Structures are given as structure tokens and as C-alpha cells.
Amino acid sequence: MTTVSQNMFDTGAELATALARKIADRLSAAIAARGQASLAVSGGSTPKALFAALSKLDIDWAKVTVTLVDERMVGPENERSNHRLAKLFLLKDRAAAAKFLPLFNSAGTAEDVAAQAAKEIDALALPFDVVVLGMGTDGHTASFFPGGSTLADVTDPACGQSVMAIEAPGAGEPRLTLTLPRIVDAGLIVLHIEGDDKRSVLARALENGPAAELPVRAVLRQAKTPVELYWAP
Ligand SMILES: O=C(O)[C@H](O)[C@@H](O)[C@H](O)[C@H](O)COP(=O)(O)O
């Protein structure tokens, strides 16, 4: 049975403050326990306020590795880049001291880039302490897009590669995405969505039906810990 732990807020600002604190506490606990912590964040427009709130919190950021849940196949200067988004909104203020691991690199094709990124992700002390997911109104999360070229592989609980390339109608450029195992074995899995449309899509995703139709279902059904839903209007 899929379970989500619901954290509902009246405004995006209130959500950002509360979620930033939750993430910071989790990262600090990991640092206290193991001397380091890891955080994977999604891109898009929703997380900007969260990133700004998190960047100001006083934790030992020098011991935190930040990476991306997914990335477009573009360089960090491109306005479509999630690396650029993280640099602009998260990796500043106190969080500027964090180590950042991009998914995009100059290895060649999307598949080559994904293979290189996978090597670098696998060199981290896994599992991730915190993974922050968004969701599209088509039910995609990470770059698990409906109709995606490698959707079955990237949502396979036994997927052997930590990062894969995927192309899909509606995804724009080819994408690089963490695969399901890297997401569902995280210590804290957050699904941060805002607006009534996405709330309705999530309600549908929590019902029976194929994961391929609403790929966020793959996370909801395989998560090793209850997914923490953070929602505001
Ligand atoms: O690269 C991306 O676009 C994100 O990682 C993606 O998975 C995002 O979380 C959803 O598309 C929601 O995006 P919005 O927050 O812009 O609605």
C-alpha cells in the first residue's frame, strides 16, 4: 500500500521555511553520524523559494554534497539548466560552501554523459540522505516522463545504473535522470508540489493503475520510507 506523509501549508513561503528546516536537520544529523551528507534536488520552477530558504540555514555545508535528481542535456550557462538553477538559488549564502556534483558533462552522447555521471554518483557515500522530487501535471517525477524512451529501465527497482538518459514527448531536450533505486533508497524522500492541479494528479497517482501512466507511481510504490508530501496552494 502506498503511503505518503502529508505536510500541507497555506502558502509556498510557509512550506519553504518548514521544508528547508526539515532538510537542514536531516543533513546535520547525517553529518553528526557520518561526517558527511548528500542531497539531490529537482529543478523546475517550484523549488526556488525552498532553495533560497535552505541556502541561508546555518549547517556545515562544507560537508554536504549537493547533486541533481535530473538534468537537461545542456551546459550550466543554458537557461534550461538545473545546474544553473541550483547555482542561482541554492548554492549561495551559507550553502555556497557545499560541494556540487553536476549530472551534465562533456562525455559525448546523452548515454555517454549518463554513464560518466553514474560513475560519479556511485562514488558518493550512498544512499542519499535527502532527495527532493517535484512532479509535473503529467505525473512525471525526476525525468520519468510518460512515453519516455527508457522509462521501463529508469523506473526498474533493479536498475543497475544510477543515472540514465531518457527522451520523451514533453521533456524538451534529452534528459539525464537518477534512476529509481537511487531515489527510493534515500533516507528522506520529499515530494514537493504546489497547486490544486498537481494535488489532483497525485490523488490519481495514489490509486491503482499502471506506473507508466503516471510514473510518480514508481516512487510511491517502491519507496523504502514513506514519501513526505509537501504541498501548498
Ligand atoms: O528538470 C525538471 O524539470 C525537474 O526536475 C522536473 O522533474 C520537475 O520537478 C517537474 O517538471 C516539475 O516542475 P515545476 O516545478 O516547474 O512544475
Image (spheres, rainbow, N blue to C red):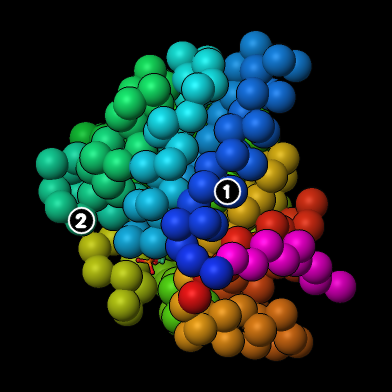
Q: Residue at x 58, y 33 (%)?
A: 24
Q: Residue at x 59, y 39 (%)?
A: 21
Left or right: where does residue 175 sit relative to residue 185?
left
Mark 1: secondary structure: helix
Marking on residue 130: none
* Disc 2 residue crowd, few under 14, some 14–19, many 20+, Cα 10 Å: some
Which residue in the structure is indicated by mark 2? 80
- Nearest the eye: 89 or 100: 89
The correct choice, above or below, for 31 with respect to 220 in the image is: above
The correct choice, above or below, for 138 with respect to 193 in the image is: below
Question: What span is in magenta?
Answer: 1-9
Quadrant of the rendered structure where residue 145 is? bottom left
Which residue in the structure is indicated by mark 1? 19
- Nearest the eye: 1 or 50: 50
Mark 2: secondary structure: loop
Quadrant of the rendered structure where residue 87 is? top left
* Residue 68 placement (x, y as % from top left): 42, 43
- The nearer-to-camera label among 2 and 1 is 1
Q: Quadrant of the N terminus?
A: bottom right
